[in-house]
């Protein structure tokens, strides 16, 4: 059987990064055995591992590898206890993460939040609010809006004989910026339950009016997807009251930053949450950066305690959004579901009140998922 060769740059980073990356690669190898694909996975240092190996959080060789790859599978970077004197622009969180985002024009951030029924106890909401399980995808615009708009400054001003400071941030969106993120969200909805809730503040903001207008126009290209609009304040409330009403939530940068964290809380643990950041599409392939939502978890690093599911589900997103392999992506997601149904729990999702659950380590969870592919 001839198989496609896909090049993946695997940058494990610091803390729990290497442990969870090992399990993710194990699962990708299991996928190779079932699907006509070969993954050419090359590992390279990033973060403090990059500083230790080559003096930089994003070594030149690591960046060159990323450029020569079809996508990046990332762990996480940053160790709060390492050298506090290093300038903030050289610290891994900035020097590696922001540089990669910029270098690859990653404008779309996708954060799926899934709470399987078996983990109802890990969710802060009462069971009757969880329905048959929560399954939301937050699509956040990542490079525009208030975080980047100019002018952005703090100045000293004098008025009526008084001197004080005035801070200005500017919210700016253009039609093409809204169009491209809307296309990503509608396409993602087509892989799912085909409902898209577009979040805005069209009752107050000019940006909200433009956002609503452009998203409505783009929706005409996706007649199979049902579009609804919701004000952001109501969206924040509805996430807590009835999260099961949402399939895909499309948000501008700041609203998405806030709502994706609010939605993440519903899943109970950071160790369950993958994310995808997408850049430009060339032909069939969309360049993407895939990583767990959590950080390096120094408190549990190196102890076989970390939950590898976020890293493993990041692989599923990579297969779906960069490689167009939806069936293989679903196989990974189903294997995660099976491992959980079978009672496997890392410490972050373990509850002593569950009679059929057993506490397992990072490696055992990875083995169970790989075996389920
Ligand atoms: P964190 O996400 O690393 O940890 C927060 C809590 O969640 C900890 O109790 C941790 O044990 C737990 N946790 C996180 N991932 C887990 C997993 N897979 N399994 C089980 N438990 C898990 O956040 P933090 O402690 O604020 O940050 C630690 C370091 O990570 C900092 O240097 C921070 O800057 C960095 N960070 C990096 C990224 C990234 O690389 N994208 C993201 C967030 C934080």
Image (cartoon, rainbow, N blue to C red):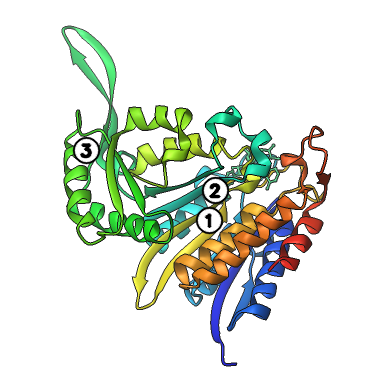
Spot occupied by residue 113 in the image (x, y as percentages of width and height): 53, 46
Residue picked out by circle 2: 93
Residue 207 location, x and y as percent?
20, 39
Q: Of marks 1 and 3, which one's residue comes earlier in the chain?
A: 1
Q: Do the residues labelled 2 and 1 touch (CB within 8 Å)?
A: yes
Relative placement, left or right, of 229 versus 38 is left
Residue ID for mark 1:
96
| Image quadrant where one finds the N terminus | bottom right
Is residue 266 positioned above or below 111 on the image?
A: above
* Label 2 near ligand 1 (CB < 8 Å): yes
Query: Looking at the image, is mark 2 or mark 3 nearer the viewer?
Result: 3
On whether ligand 1 comes within 8 Å of the CB at mark 1, the answer is: yes
Query: Badge 3, how many Cα within 10 Å: few under 14, some, many 20+?
Result: some
Q: In which quarter of the image is ligand 1?
A: top right
Q: Please determine whether, in this image, residue 323 is positioned above or below residue 343.
A: below
Residue at 67% x, 63% y is: 24
Task: Tell me the residue at 28%/15% (across/down).
Answer: 164
């Amino acid at each position: 059987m001839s198989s496609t060769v896909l090049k993946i740059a695997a940058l494990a980073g610091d803390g729990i990064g290497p442990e969870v990356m090992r399990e993710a690669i194990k699962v990708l190898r299991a996928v190779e055995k079932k699907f006509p694909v070969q993954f050419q996975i090359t590992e390279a240092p990033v973060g403090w591992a990059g500083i230790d190996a080559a003096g930089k959080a994003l070594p030149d060789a690591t960046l060159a590898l990323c450029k020569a790859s079809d996508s990046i599978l990332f762990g996480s970077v940053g160790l709060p206890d390492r050298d506090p004197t290093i300038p903030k622009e050289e610290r891994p969180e900035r020097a590696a993460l922001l540089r990669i985002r910029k270098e690859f024009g990653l404008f779309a951030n996708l954060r799926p939040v899934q709470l399987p029924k078996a983990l109802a106890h890990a969710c802060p909401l009462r069971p009757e609010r969880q329905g048959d399980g929560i399954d939301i995808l937050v699509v956040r615009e990542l490079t525009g809006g208030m975080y980047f708009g100019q002018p952005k400054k703090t100045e000293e001003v004098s008025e009526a004989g008084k001197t004080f400071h005035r801070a200005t941030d500017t919210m700016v969106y253009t039609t093409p910026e809204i169009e491209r993120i809307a296309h990503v969200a509608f396409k993602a909805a087509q892989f799912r339950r085909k409902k898209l809730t577009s979040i805005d503040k069209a009752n107050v903001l000019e940006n909200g009016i433009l956002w609503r207008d452009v998203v409505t126009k783009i929706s005409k290209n996706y007649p199979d997807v049902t579009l609804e609009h919701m004000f952001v304040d109501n969206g924040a409330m509805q996430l807590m009251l009835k999260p099961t009403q949402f399939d895909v939530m499309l948000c501008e940068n700041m609203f998405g930053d806030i709502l994706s964290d609010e939605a993440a809380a519903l899943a109970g643990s950071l160790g369950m949450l993958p994310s995808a950041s997408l850049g430009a599409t060339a032909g069939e392939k969309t360049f993407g950066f895939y990583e767990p939502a959590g950080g390096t978890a120094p408190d549990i690093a190196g102890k076989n305690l970390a939950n590898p599911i976020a890293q493993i589900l990041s692989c599923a997103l990579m297969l779906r959004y960069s490689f167009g392999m939806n069936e293989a992506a679903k196989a990974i997601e189903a294997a995660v579901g099976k491992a959980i149904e079978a009672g496997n729990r890392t410490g972050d999702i373990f509850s002593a009140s569950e009679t059929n659950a057993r506490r397992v380590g990072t490696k055992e969870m990875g083995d169970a998922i790989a075996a389920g592919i």
